[in-house]
Image (tube, rainbow, N blue to C red):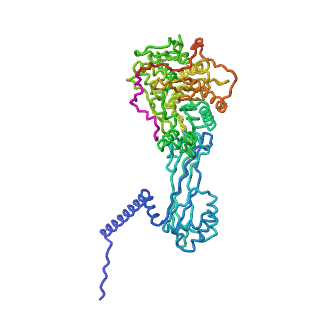
């Protein structure tokens, strides 16, 4: 009798169980997929390196090419040149006896290496897989070796590693602006400030040999650094450096700085200080010291000399600005409405301020002066009266508005802050002496930026030396937007300053700054250094052209002129400015028009006194006056040393 087979039915419980299993499988797949995506995105690089490290028996870094630096017109100022290192792999060469002789022959014939020497090197490092034998060989040798190897089967264990060396085609050109690069990155200037952009990203190559000794590689390409397009103009910078070199050779001084700037946007066309140094050999002191002097110097002395040579006087050193600051004082008072262009002042050769007798640069007195004449003749007494009307709170406020006592933010390393007197310590005497630029310290770039804002109608631009940053493919990643960060003065004040400073050059203290056929305006400055009894001076001049709509401004500062006949005279600074302007104005498309006359507001000017004194501020402070003004303000202190010195 046959047993009847029982048929099981697919009931609801089974359906629920199957559905549960299905859902579980789907969720598990979803979880695993999500986990794989997460691992790939977050841990992919790490795990990839682990896999590569397990399969690779050798690896090398692919060095990124450091980005180039050019002037505003595309002239290359710094570039990286590709060189090669000779890499030996003794472990592979010693794999079979028949590899040795062909490899030694190739090294001798193509690279000029002695066979016995190479044999000793290989046998002396039998387990090495990466041995750097020689650095910085030329590509012609690499090409010759590779060509030889292609026709000789048993030449193994030799390859070439690419690297880059930094070169500066023009040697000492703009060295204090550019800085230099080492294998560890940029040092000083643009090279350090923009190091992140210039450096790029290294690549990596992992490799191994298969049983047939064929090279198998996995490569992650390097990303080259970006190109910096600077605001520097090659021709203008060249003129500046030539004038400085000539002055140092014929007259000499302790320090000198020159800045040429576009006052309309803060772009710096040229900046130089003292003798520039060779960027291709930045640790060489030759030329600055004799062999005998170098032989007598200790290592510490040499390092101090190097730091001084690398230092950018234009941004890292501070000094009392002297009478160039009078323009700032007048502009501030005009903005506050405490004076007007029609005001007049009396000068008897000195003023009593806070119980001290403070003399004018003309000890005999200027007599009755208009406001414009106060600037033209650089009258200390008039400026003290103006500062008194302005008051300490407003005086301090405008110092801050014009950027003094703080870094300008220029894109260079080592900028100092300067030192201004805190407003609570601006007593009667301190306010009086500050009005004509003594008892506080500034940097050149601070003065240049402040003047630019007055000349352009009141827009304060952060001075800058880089105009644009582009990738190696030419894509712009950063562009200076030339935006004004604040307003300093009104256009009415600007117009008055244009007129007054034009007359300062035409018939005032700055007549050596004249350039035939051009409308030049400017202001001289002379400050007596401390201790005052030593009779040492910092002289300066700010010049601009054309007067009605300034397109270029030149600022020259000379510290301690060596010629005793010129001590305390601002004429070396005004004459150098005239020489620079005479060469760069035609280059910038501004051409002379013969003897031209600029029409000024005659209501602002009285008939000029022939007794115009060069503004030597000698004796304007009592020698027993306790100058405690150089106390550091609460906003910051002047490191006066640069960031990396």
To which quarter of the image does residue 160 belong? bottom right
Q: Magenta stretch containing residue 34, yes or no? A: no
Name, please, the residue furthest toward the right.
Answer: 594
Q: Which quadrant is home to the N terminus?
A: bottom left
Name, please, the residue furthest toward the bottom.
Answer: 1
Residue 483 lies, with reference to residue 548, above or below; the image says below
What residue range appears in magenta? 626-644
Q: Magenta stretch containing residue 627, yes or no? A: yes
Residue 482 lies, with reference to residue 356, above or below; the image says below
The one nearer the camera, 279 or 486, is 279
Q: Residue 171: x percent and y percent?
A: 60, 43
Q: Residue 205: x percent and y percent?
A: 51, 60
- Numbered disc total: 0
Q: Residue 178: x percent and y percent?
A: 55, 41
Residue 424 lies, with reference to residue 644, above or below; the image says above
Q: Is residue 429 visible?
A: yes
The one nearer the camera, 353 or 412, is 353
Residue 307 lies, with reference to residue 391, above or below; the image says below
Kindly report the secondary structure that dominates the magenta region of the rendered protein: loop
To which quarter of the image does residue 624 belong? top left
Q: Is residue 476 visible?
A: no
Q: Residue 547: x percent and y percent?
A: 60, 24
């Amino acid at each position: 009798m046959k047993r009847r087979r029982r048929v099981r039915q697919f009931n609801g419980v089974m359906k629920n169980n199957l559905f549960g299993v299905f859902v579980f499988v789907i969720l598990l797949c979803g979880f695993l997929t999500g986990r794989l995506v997460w691992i790939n995105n977050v841990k992919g690089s790490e795990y990839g390196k682990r896999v590569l490290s397990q399969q690779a028996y050798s690896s090398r870094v692919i060095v990124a090419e450091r980005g180039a630096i050019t002037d505003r017109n595309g002239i290359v100022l710094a570039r990286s040149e590709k060189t090669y290192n000779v890499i030996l792999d003794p472990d592979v060469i010693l794999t079979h006896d028949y590899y040795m002789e062909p490899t030694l022959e190739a090294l001798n014939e193509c690279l000029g290496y002695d066979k016995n020497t190479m044999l000793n090197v290989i046998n002396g490092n039998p387990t090495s897989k990466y041995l750097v034998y020689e650095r910085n060989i030329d590509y012609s040798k690499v090409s010759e070796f590779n060509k030889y190897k292609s026709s000789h089967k048993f030449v193994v264990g030799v390859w070439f590693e690419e690297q880059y060396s930094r070169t500066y085609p023009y040697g000492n050109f703009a060295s204090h602006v550019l800085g230099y690069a080492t294998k560890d990155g940029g040092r000083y200037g643009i090279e350090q400030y923009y190091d992140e952009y210039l450096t790029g990203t290294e690549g990596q190559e992992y490799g191994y040999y298969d049983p047939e000794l064929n090279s198998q590689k996995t490569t992650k390409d390097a990303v080259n650094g970006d190109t910096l397009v600077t605001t520097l103009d090659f021709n203008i910078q060249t003129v500046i450096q030539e004038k400085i070199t000539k002055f140092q050779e014929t007259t000499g001084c302790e320090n000198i700085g020159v800045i040429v700037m576009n006052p309309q946007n803060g772009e710096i066309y040229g900046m130089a200080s003292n003798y520039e140094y060779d960027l291709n050999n930045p640790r060489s002191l030759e030329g600055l010291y004799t062999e005998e002097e170098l032989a007598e110097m200790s290592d510490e002395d040499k390092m101090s000399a190097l730091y001084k040579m690398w230092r950018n006087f234009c941004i890292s050193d501070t000094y009392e600005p002297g009478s160039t600051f009078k323009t700032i004082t007048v502009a501030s008072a005009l903005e506050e409405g405490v004076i007007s262009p029609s005001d007049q002042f009396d000068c008897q050769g000195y003023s009593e301020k806070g119980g001290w007798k403070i003399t004018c640069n003309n000890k005999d007195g200027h007599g009755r002066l208009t406001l414009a004449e106060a600037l033209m003749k650089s009258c200390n007494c008039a400026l003290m009266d103006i500062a008194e009307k302005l008051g300490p709170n407003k005086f301090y406020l405008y110092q801050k508005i014009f950027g003094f006592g703080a870094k300008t933010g220029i894109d260079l390393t080592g900028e100092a802050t300067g030192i201004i007197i805190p407003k609570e310590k601006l007593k009667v005497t301190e306010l009086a002496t500050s009005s004509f630029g003594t008892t506080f310290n500034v940097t050149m770039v601070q003065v240049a930026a402040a003047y630019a804002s007055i000349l352009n109608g009141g827009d304060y631009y952060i001075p800058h030396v880089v105009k644009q940053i582009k990738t190696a493919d030419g894509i712009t990643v950063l562009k200076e937007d030339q935006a004004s960060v604040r307003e300093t003065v009104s256009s009415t004040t600007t117009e008055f300053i244009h007129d007054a400073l034009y007359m300062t050059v035409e018939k005032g203290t700055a007549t050596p700054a004249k350039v035939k056929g051009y409308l030049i305006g400017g202001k001289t400055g002379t400050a007596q250094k401390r201790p005052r009894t030593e009779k040492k001076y910092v002289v300066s001049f700010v010049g601009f052209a054309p007067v009605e709509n300034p397109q270029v401004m030149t600022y020259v500062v000379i510290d301690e002129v060596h010629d005793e006949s010129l001590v305390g005279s601002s004429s070396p600074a005004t004459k150098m400015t005239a020489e620079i302007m005479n060469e760069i104005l035609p280059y910038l498309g501004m051409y002379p028009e013969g003897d031209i006359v600029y029409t000024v507001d005659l209501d602002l000017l009285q008939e000029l006194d022939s007794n115009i004194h060069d503004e030597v501020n000698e004796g304007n402070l009592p020698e027993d006056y306790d100058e405690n003004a150089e106390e550091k303000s609460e906003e910051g202190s002047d490191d006066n040393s640069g960031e990396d010195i």
